[in-house]
Image (spheres, rainbow, N blue to C red):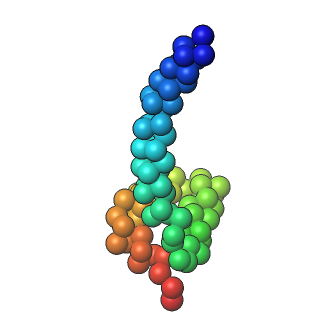
Amino acid sequence: MFCLFFSVVVIVVAESAPSFFFLSFVNSSSSMMFDELPQVDALWYFLNDIYFIRTVHEYTIENDFFNRLIYIFCNPQILIYWTKFR
């Protein structure tokens, strides 16, 4: 009975351990880019501008600003430029 329990535990650990380590490395590399930004005040003000434009119902300007925001987050060089110390 003990051998059966031990073999089940070994199988469960062997199946779940690689996926746990893989997901921890994948998530750390993708979130590191956003966790290590030095100065995010410019992005914060830009997000507040988008929110303000949405509250005054200027949807075309909001769409333009949102497209710029997506461009900033998709391009690491631009993201570093926006968040560097000044």
On screen, residue 50 above or below 19 = below
Q: Extreme bottom residue here? A: 86
Question: Residue at the front extreme?
Answer: 2
Taking the spot 65% from the left edge, 55% from the top edge, the residue there is 55
Q: Nearer the viewer, residue 83 or 53?
A: 83
Q: Quadrant of residue 52?
A: bottom right
Residue in view at x 43 percent, y 55 percent: 30
Q: Nearer the viewer, residue 40 or 69?
A: 40
In this rendering, the count of numbered labels is 0
| Residue 30 vertical position relative to residue 36 in the rendered view, above or below | above
Q: What is the quadrant of residue 40 in the picture?
A: bottom right
* Residue at 42% in and 74% down: 80
**Looking at the figure, which quarter contains the N terminus?**
top right
Q: Relative to residue 78, is residue 40 drawn left or right?
A: right
Above or below, 60 against 39 in this view is above
The image position of residue 51, as x and y in percent, is 61, 59
**Nearer to the camera, 18 or 39:** 18
Work out whether residue 18 or residue 37 is closer to the camera in this orientation and state it. 18
Q: Indicate left or right for 85 with 1 as reference.
A: left
Q: Is 75 drawn above or below residue 60 in the view shown?
A: below
Q: What is the x, y in percent for residue 7?
A: 50, 20
Q: Quadrant of residue 14?
A: top left
Instruction: Tell me if residue 62 can be seen.
Output: yes
Q: Is residue 64 visible?
A: no
Question: In the displayed structure, does residue 85 sit left or right of residue 55?
Answer: left
- Residue lying farthest top? 1
Q: Residue at x 36, y 67 (%)?
A: 76
